[in-house]
Image (cartoon, rainbow, N blue to C red):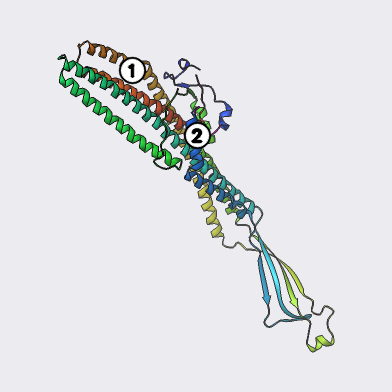
Amino acid sequence: MSLTKAAVCASGWLALSLLSLPAAWAGSAPFTAYGDQRLAALIAEALDRNPSIREALLDSQAAHHRIPQATALPDPTLAFTWHAEPPQTRVGPQRGGISVSQRIPWFGKRADRGAVARKLAEAHDETAALRRAEVIHQVKFAYYDLAYLDRAISITEREEEVLRLYESLAQTRYAQGGGLQQAVVRLQAEITRVQSRRDGFLQRRAEIETALNTLRDRPDLEPVAETRLESLPVVNVNEPRLRQLGRAQRPEVRAAHLHLAAEEGNLRLARRAYAPDFTLGAAWGGVGPRRDVAGRLAPPSDNGQDTASFTVGINVPLHRNRYRAAEREALARFQAAKAAHRRTVIAVDGDVRTATVRLTRVGERIALFERALLPQAEQALRSTESAYAAGHIGVVDLLDSEAALLDAQLKLARMKSDYMQALADMERAIGTAFPEERS
């Protein structure tokens, strides 16, 4: 696809297509580096070393360990009995006994608790995915800021070289009596201004470098190599399809859906609370032989025989107000989760829309600068340089043309980085790699 074939967007960088995105994009990687191996390496390092991602992954592991806890039966109760004054029975005195009981929740309660725990664990998985997406987005923003700053530093360094050539020419003219000392002073002041501007870029670069090192859990002062943007990727934006991708792939939407499912399970549990739980028990009683006169003279056939018994019991849910209050609480939480899910979907649609508008506007401005404004500034400077060399104009006009070109170059560099950051915004908005087409 060539830039001249953009159907709707006049930028040449962004094409708004009416075609659907390929279905394979829905299962693609969570990010793309657009062929930039250095960026891919930085992202991979951040994903491997970032402490916040590690924290989220460990939280997710902990949540999964709650699932077997939620589905397990309550611990059985084991009881020992010893009679200080043994009661007498027909077959002898009862000395003591052992009993064990097991509470068994009503049918479906354990399954519902397990389902709730599982949904919450999966929601923690999505939280970890969200943390990864945020780190990727931050690394990309820092990287593209570095790309702009490195380009700006290079532009100002070349600008200083050109101004020094102008200064040398002005000094030569002044020495030969064909120029004014004011021109030399004005050029020197402009050189100082450009140097100050470059120093500002260098300071800002150090700050972004520190932020990028923090994301990778690296020492603050570790240098990051010079960054360059090559050709910008050409992309097709189908906003309705991207909204569908965002609703399906965005970690926040998935987490909200899982929280909704968990609250639905809690509501089922609250409604099952009206049903009683079972308690099954078994007991053994130790009985000694009869030692009374009658027992010794005519012992029963089962003299001293131990006893065994089995019990089945249920709890009686009498306090209905408590159960009704728990059900109303669960229902309110379920409705709140539905509202949160809807709010998240609306936010995703808004993020996609914002990223689409930004991509379109920045792409149009890039095309305008490359097609018209930058060539015009370059042509104007060449004409001004020729007029200055011939002595037809003064240094002020020369500096005005040079400043206009410098401003156009810096703005174009900034917009190219903005364009890549807008792509990162879109990738973050849809929760998966943004589709790429190269011309």
- Residue extent of the magenta highlight: 28-35
Residue on which the image places disc 1: 373
Q: Main secondary structure of the magenta part?
A: loop
The amino acid type, in three-letter code, at marker 1 is Leu
Which dot, 1 or 2, sits closer to the camera?
Answer: 2
Queried whether the magenta region covers residue 177, the answer comes back as no
Does residue 170 appear to the left or right of 97 in the view shown?
A: left
Mark identifier at residue 41: 2
The amino acid type, in three-letter code, at marker 2 is Ala
Q: Which SS class for mark 2?
A: helix
Label 1 and label 2: CA atoms lie apart by 36 Å
Q: Which SS class for mark 1?
A: helix
Q: Position of residue 392 (x, y in %)?
A: 20, 11
The answer to whether residue 143 shows anywhere in this view is: yes
Task: Relative to 372, say whether 60 is above or below.
Answer: below
Q: Position of residue 164 (x, y in %)?
A: 26, 22
> Which residue is depicted at the point 42% across and 19% down?
11
Does residue 78 appear to the left or right of 166 in the view shown?
A: right
> Which residue is depicted at the point 16% across and 14% down?
176
Residue 153: quadrant of the picture: top left
The residue nearer to you, when weighing 384 against 367, is: 384
